[in-house]
Every structure is written in C-alpha cells, then in structure tokens.
Amino acid sequence: MRATALNQRLLRGQTPSYERLQARLAEDGTAQASTPQVLHCGWGRLLIGHTYPDAASLAADLLGEQPGERDIALYVAAPQQVLAQAPQQLFLDPSDTLRLWFSDYRPARRPHRGFNIRRAGSDSDWQAINRLHQQRGMLPVDPTRLTPLHKGGPTYWLAEDSTSGVVIGSVMGLDHCRAFHDPENGSSLWCLAVDPQCPRPGVGESLVRHLIEHFMGRGLNYLDLSVLHDNRQAKNLYAKLGFRDLQTFSLKHKNGFNQPLFLGPGPEAALNPYARIIIDEARRRGIGVLVNDAEAGLFSLNHGGRRIRCRESLSDLTSAVSMTLCQDKQLTHRAFARAGLRQPEQRLAGSPEDNAAFLAEHGSLVVKPVNGEQGQGVAVDLQDAAAVEAAIERARQFDSRVLLESYHTGHDLRVLVIGFEVVAAAIRRPPEVIGDGRHSIGALIEALSRRRQAATGGESRIPLDAETQRTLHAAGYDYDRVLPAGIRLAVRKTANLHTGGSLEDVTAQLHPQLREAALRAAHALDIPVVGLDLLVPDATQAEHVFIEANERPGLANHEPQPTAERFVDLLFPLLRQQS
C-alpha cells in the first residue's frame, strides 16, 4: 500500500481545508457527509476538524464541551483561525500526532504470553477500564454516551490476565471509514492504559499491535495516535513499531483536566505526586498555594489569614515530638507498648553472639535502621546468623543504630489516619514478576520498574541491590536466569512502594478491631496524620501486629479514597466538605 497524494500532503503539514477535501473526495468518487462529524468516546467527543466548513462552527462545537468531559478537535488545518474565535477558552494541544503506514508495519516475531486481548462489552469490563483510567490519571468512560458502532463509534479492547482474569490493559480504536467516511482509509488509537502494577511485560505493545492488525484486516491503510510531547517511554515504543511524526494540529477546551497542558510547567511541576495531589485539592477550593522548595516537596497553603506549611502530608499541625516518635522506631515501639498494642519483639543489634541468640529465640528476624524511611536498609525473613550480620552492616549505612525484630508472616497493611479518623486502608504487596519463558529475571525486573516509575512520577522503582539479590538467591534464582512462562516470583520481601511494591485498596473490608487499633495508635503518638503499618493474615480479620508508623504518608497511593480532601479538611476546617 502506498500513501495517496492527500496523505502525503498531511505528512508535510498540508492538512486540507473543508473545501479542498470535498473537491478531493469528488475526484475520488467517495461520498462524504455534508454535516460536521462528531463522535462520542465515553469521556468526551472527537470533532473531526476537516469536516467543518469554517472555523467559527468548529470553535462553537468545541465550546459546547460538557462538564466533566474532554473534547478534542483533531486534523485542524488552520488552528489559528479557530483559536481566534475564542482565545481565552481554547488552546493548541502540545501533544504530538504520530502515524504508522501499515505498509511499514512488521509483525512481532513472537506472540505475547500470559494474557488475552478481547473486546469490552459488559458492565464489569467498563468498571475495569475505568479502574485503569483512574490509575493513569485519565477520565472515566461512560458507555451509555458512546456513539454506536454502526454509526462510526469507537471500540474498546481489553488485555486480560490468563491466570487471574484481571484486566491489565485497555485501548480504544476508531475506524475512520465508519466514523467520517475517510477517503484515505485510516484509523486511530486512543486511551492506551496499562495497569502500573502489572507484572507481565509487553502488554502495551501487544495492545497497539492488536489494534494495528485488526485494522489491517479491515483493509485500512494507517493508524494515527496522539502522545504527549514529553512522554519519552511511549514515544520509544511507537518509534520501535514504525510510527512517524504527522504535522497536524489538535485543539482543546481550557478546563481543569487540561490545565497542565495550557498553563505549562509552573513551580509545582517539579513536585512529586504526594505533594501535587494536595496542591490540586487546595486550588480546587480556592486556597492559595506557594511552592517553597519543589525538590523537597515543601509548600505553603493560605486562606483567610490562615497559613499552613507542608512537606507533602507533613504539616505544621504535627508537633516535633510526634514526628520524633514516628521516626525513631524504638520510641514508636515504646509508645505502642504503653498503649497495649500488639507488636513484634524488638531489641538493638549487639554482638554477633547476642544477635544469634535473638535469632535462635525467634527463628526468623527483620533488620532495620532505627531512623529510616522508604524501606531503606530493611531486610526481612532472615533465618541464619551470617545473613543477619550482613543485613546489619547494610542498615548501618542509614543509621548507626540498628534494630532486630521478630519476623511475623502476613500481609503488609497500611492504614491512613487523618484527624483521628481512618480514611484509607490498603494491602501492600511486594513487587513480583511473571515469567514469559524468554526474558531474564533482571530484564523482567527492569521492565516492571520502568512501569512503576512512569505510574508514580519516578517515586517507585525496584532497586537491583543486595536485598533484591538475596531474595532471588533464597528462591533459587539470579538476575540472568530466564523465568519459565507463568511462574510468579517475588523479587523483594518488603512491600514498600518506593522499592516497587503495589497497593490493593481494602478500606471497605477493614475489620472494626483493626480500625479501633489504628485509632489507638494515632492517639498514642498524638499525631493528626499518620500511616500505620501492620502485618495481618487478612484485612477482614482482627489478628494483627504493628510494625511501623509514618509521619509523612503518601496520600496519592490510596486512590480512590478521598485522602487529599480529608487532609485539606484538617488544615482548613472552615472549608470542610461533606464526606
């Protein structure tokens, strides 16, 4: 297949006007609807720019965007003319448009493994898609608003884990011939989303390839897509598949969702997700924001003469004493002991003989620095004296004082307490990979780490350090070993999010005694915001032991729970919103 003259002009940036397109269609003998073509995708409308007779009508339609939706005008030949109609309300999308000519496409040499791709259709499918969209900061899909397929509407596809049946990816495709009688027989891809906690490699690429091959099978010629100009990871994937830049333009309406695109990077652009989620909520309520130190996550919130300084979720409302009680794990243990809370046995690391005696008493130990965060220097389930001594030396890189604790099995439960109310609870799971029979364990870890970094703004990654290596060796593997297809392998014992762990929200299932114990712990520390870490057999059971308290918990980790809303309620009670 070769590109027609019209599409060659598109590639050179010469998008046809309405009149020229109609003339071209007449030459080709192709019918074209006389009315502008608009398609609803469940999250907003696609307005096909070159089907509009003039700039004013396109601008008017784009200004008709409904609240909570995101409309996109694409293939706009003269964007300056449309922007001139409403310069305060419309903007030029900075995303890049890419095109793959199917004549340039080369199929994958090996098929994907471990998941299936199918069309979405049931209510549970739409719920799964919206879960993915929420995780990736995308608007949800309302399937009742979709343009029907027989009228040119889109199709959504799912990638479903073959073992668990969990939906791990989704993508939307649009057949341009059906949608707007495209004389060039094109198609487009939208809303590619992959679960950031998915341990299987290649899901995003497989969804893109599936859409390409589906439209090739329908006799179409190319696939277009839009990608943020600075999304290097996605652009590398598309370049690998043969996509090239397409010089065309898209326009959008200025709304809250699009704000980062038309305002550009401000001082908060360098803030991590844990600070941004609070700032976004504060601005939504009209609270003034001053970024003091973006790299450190420091900012100030101001409203009605009240000023609160924050470092992410740590604020002026947390006293220095309460903060110290959390940071020093010995003090945390004592405070919880006075409150009668269940905890592991604990002691400071001493001589090798004393450490070995403590190990013999409990059979398995946890080693951690007295003052540490983000899982640094923590080693879990150590069962021989040599491993304990090696872990102690690693932990001393973060604090000269090192703790030994009795090891307890169970799930790692994080309970978030704000204003002495339980706001969220989540099971934290250690990072694990699933073998495909082709890639080494090291390659699987690096791929999962890239996905976790992309999903968390660089906050989560799996370090290829001594603890990861120890975990692999304990399971009988190393970095160079190819993991057999379908085999699941935990690559660290700890479930800390900063070292690649993942979260499963269990707020609704939390046992009442766990809620009560979490509140007792927060009162024991006298702290208004705290993330409490427990080991539990299950979130629905009362059995537990407390292991840590975090004075600066990451609020962004607990979506869809209203963590930022409750935090801002605490800081500015006069602006408190109803739960």
Image: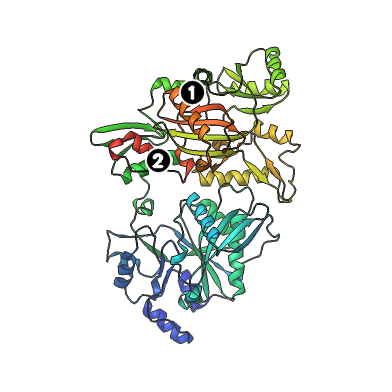
**Closer mark to the observer between disc 1 and disc 2:** 2
User: Residue at label 1?
Assistant: 327
Q: Report how far apart the C-alphas of labels 1 and 2 lie in the structure.
A: 23 Å
Indicate the position of residue 157 as horizontal and vertical percent values.
57, 63
Name the residue at 62% across, 44% down.
446
Q: Give coordinates of residue 399: x percent, y percent.
A: 55, 20
Label 2 Cα neighbours within 10 Å, binned few <14 / some 14-19 / many ≥20: many
Q: Is residue 478 left or right of residue 307?
A: right
Residue assigned mark 2: 564
List the single residue furthest toward the left. 305
Residue 62 as seen in the image, left or right of residue 198: left
What secondary structure is marked by label 2?
A: helix
Q: Is residue 395 visible?
A: yes
Residue type for callout 1: Gln
Q: Which image quadrant is residue 20 in?
A: bottom left
Residue 500's spot in the image, x, y percent? Answer: 58, 39
On the image, the x and y values in percent for residue 88 come to: 27, 58
| Residue type of the residue flagged with mark 2 | Ala
In the foreground, 261 or 302: 302
